[in-house]
Image (cartoon, rainbow, N blue to C red):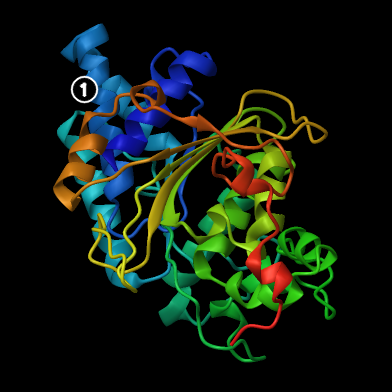
Amino acid sequence: VQAQVRIADHLLRSRMNKPMGFATGGVNVLDPAVGTGTYLLGIVEHALTEVEKAEGPGAMPARADVLGSALYGFEIMVGPYAVAALRLTRMLQQYGGHVPGDGAQVMLTNTLESPHEKIPELPLLYQPIGLEHKRAKRVKDTVPVLVCIGNPPYDRHAAATADNRAMTGGWVRWGESKSGSDAILGDFIEPVKRAGHGGDLKNLYNLYVYFWRWALWKTFEHDLATGPGIVSYISASSFIDGDAFLGMRRWMRKQCDEIWVIDLGGEGRGTRKDDNVFAIQTPVAITVAVRYGSPKPGSPAKSHYARVKGKRAEKLATLESLQSLADLKFDPCPDDWDAPFRPAGRGQYFTWPLLTDILPWQH
């Protein structure tokens, strides 16, 4: 969390003319899977520590007010949502700041549901839940987001049915029309089909992919998102080079100017096990996708790759030492639209045909 916060703050200061980083007015930040609020709390702590260094302790209450009105979080589970709202309120008050009149801007909602759907009036007992949905819908509809940051859920969920669409991608995967032709996940799917990898698409239907698609839409494609933005996620790393994700990589390159992938490894299955920074078996990566100004859809984003190796403690120590992206050695990735987010291999070996092309039947 701290590494992602410091990297985003440095980009705001150095590349987006935000001299106080997160504490600059107008820097709206959203964590769309806020959990108990760890990212928002990390932003407050880091930003106000920097304010104290630059402007002195007397400036901290006013800057805390700025943060209180610019930090947003969405959470689908009632327990974490309540904890996040309480923790954020308490931290802002500790620094002398205030939350907006309707409370901390942590909202109980399903991030992936439609931002356009009309919310029905609920019975009296459930009206507070309806109010949360309305607050979240207002943010989805009318609040431009400069930074989308977090740790989205990742899971290859159960098979989708007509009854579980809300939990298998919601509006992102299914859209609002009966045919689903307006679903924004189609931008990830169609290039895969055209490339002849439709049989691999089952790997794309993962919660973290839906959250990536939503973040790109909200930060770079929304009606109010015409300029710069940052998406910083730690998520499963299967998108780095899997065939099912070539459309995702293409869309990221189309929307952004620069992309950095910090591969943390962590494969817990098979014979070549690797320590994970989390207590899970799925390899993970921190990805920072940035646009500096107006979109340039005709030019693929420059992408960079770094691998952090070692035991869990060593990986965490490396992240703890990061102050900016310049503190890691990145290798450039190919510029091809669909290419993996990894450096191209060097040498004659990499010109040979794949074994799976020569022997396409595998068992």
Q: Is residue 194 left or right of residue 55?
A: right
In the depicted structure, whether residue 353 falls above or below residue 51: below
Label 1 SS: helix
- Residue 226: image quadrant is top right
User: Which residue is most to the front?
Assistant: 348
Residue 150 x, y percent position in the rendering: 40, 49
Viewer-side residue, 131 vs 142:
142
Residue 37 x, y percent position in the rendering: 30, 52
Image quarter (top left, top right, bottom left or bottom right) of the N terminus: top left
Viewer-side residue, 177 vs 300:
300
Name the residue: 67% across, 33% down.
301
In the depicted structure, whether residue 215 falls above or below residue 115: above
Q: Amino acid at mark 1?
A: Thr
Work out whether residue 73 can be spotted.
Answer: no
Q: Is residue 344 left or right of residue 281?
A: right
Q: Is residue 232 left or right of residue 159?
A: left
- Residue 82: image quadrant is bottom left
In the depicted structure, whether residue 343 falls above or below residue 133: above
Q: Is residue 208 left or right of residue 204?
A: left
Name the residue: 28% across, 29% down.
322
Name the residue: 71% across, 60% down.
188
Viewer-side residue, 348 vs 216:
348
Label 1, on which residue? Answer: 49
